[in-house]
Amino acid sequence: MADTRIEFCGVTFKNPLAAASAEPTLNAANMKKCIDAGAGAVIAKTMTDSPDMRELTQRAKWRFLNAKHEVCHGKVPRSFSLYSRSGLALEPPEDFMKEITETVKYAAQKDAVVIGSIGSTDIDGWVTLGKQMEDGGVPLVELNFGCPHPKLMPGVRTGMNVGQDFDYACEITQKVSEALNVPIIIKVTPQVTDLVLFSSMLQKAGAKAVTLTNRFIGFVPDIETGKPLIYGKAGVGGPWTKPLTLRWINEVRAALGDKLYITGTNGAYDWRDIVMFIMSGAHIVQMCSAVMCYGYDWLTKQVKGLEVFMDEKGYQTIDQMLGIATDACMEYSQMPHEKAIVDKEKCINCGMCLKVCFSDAMQPDEENVYVKEENCVGCGGCYSVCPEKGTISIVKV
């Protein structure tokens, strides 16, 4: 059977699946449910010294949206969006730390890892919260520089408001890393111009890992009422964001390699996505939206799915998959020339390929289509829309 263990920042995880910092990890009771479901780790809801961010959680609202960005009202599609307004941990630090220490003890019995998450409004606060987490027994502390909600609250400088100020973020990172003995992880916002540059700066400032990435800020009107869903702008994420997140994981992995550990989040829906995150370069994968939609049992299914996949494909360890897609990634100029080939015996002459060929390469015939080779650039549009699998192939020339 495949070995799903992975080493991350000097800590061994029994599997790479982590429950992300959100409502499913709001308190000890919730975190224990994640652990019981088989998650290798839980990232606690972000502990904060900001009363505003704690109070916002008292009014948390979220909706699962379909492809039309309407509330699902029943079956939630795979490519759903999570549209939400929320805050950070409900309790002040002195009370929330009781939840942390209780969970740390429970996790030790279940071979799971608890990662602390913190968010302050000034540098001294970041250091204080970090020390409290370390004293509570967590082996890793994540600094939340990506939470979108503070951006929507004037006067609250934490989360995304920190992550968009690279110099300030690095100053905090340096102060916290110097004050703590445990490794620190920085959770970043995707709403910046260059996460490779930022990740490199954070690594030099003392971070051992980055979490790529937190959610975006979105706005969705309800056309029936003419009013915005859940009263206004909100954090938006979900499975649809996966290619955007994987792009940054790919680029940070390619640029920094072994200098920085990566944990991926925002877009991981199931075990297939866990594999994609790992192959892109993420050591561990955080899952949130799908758990909020389907419940804690979803975690169990994904751990099992990962194990089955690894056995079927012959991967004995997670390390054998780590970053292999990024390692094989080509620049545009490196791509080979290709052409389309049509199997006339399988072609049903539906005409779909003719509609998507903009090189005038796919040509109609009485019984099927054929390829005018001198025009074909091998784009693959025809291959993508052909309803008869195996009829069209894209081959190197």
Image: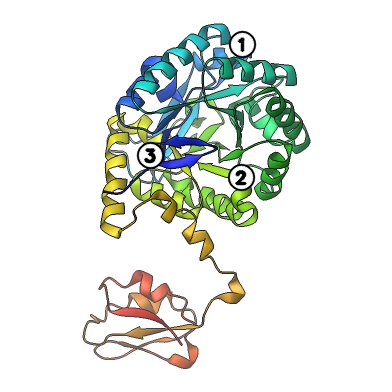
Task: Please report contact status of discs 3 and 1: CB closer than 8 Å, yes or no.
Answer: no
Task: Name the element at disc 1.
Answer: helix
Return the residue nearer the eye: 332 or 236: 332
Q: Amino acid at mark 2?
A: Leu
Residue at 66% from the left image edge and 50% from the top image edge: 196
User: Badge 3 is on which residue?
Assistant: 15
Q: Could you tell me how far apart the alpha carbons at marks 3 and 1 are, in whole angstroms?
A: 35 Å
Q: Single out the mark in the foreground, 3 or 1.
A: 3
Disc 3 residue type (three-letter): Asn
- Distance Cα–Cα, label 2 vs label 3: 19 Å
Residue 27 image position (x, y, % from top left): 43, 16
3 sits left or right of 347 in the view = right
Which badge, 2 or 3, is on the more N-terminal residue? 3
The residue sitting at 27% across, 76% down in the picture is: 390
Which label number is shown at residue 260? 2
Q: How is the image coloured?
A: rainbow
Residue neighbourhood size for the residue with mark 2, other residues' Cα within 10 Å, grouped as few (<14), some (14–19), many (≥20): many
| Residue furthest to the top | 95
124, above or below 355, in the image:
above
Q: Can you say whether 133 is above or below 9 in the image? A: above
Residue 50 visible (yes or no): yes
Element carrying mark 3: loop
Give the x, y percent position of residue 370: 34, 89
Residue under circle 1?
51
Task: Give, as a three-letter code, the residue at label 1.
Answer: Pro
Residue at point 56% right, 14% down?
54
Q: Residues within 10 Å of mark 3 (few under 14, many from 20)?
A: many
Callout 1: few (<14), some (14-19), or many (20+) C-alpha neighbours within 10 Å?
some
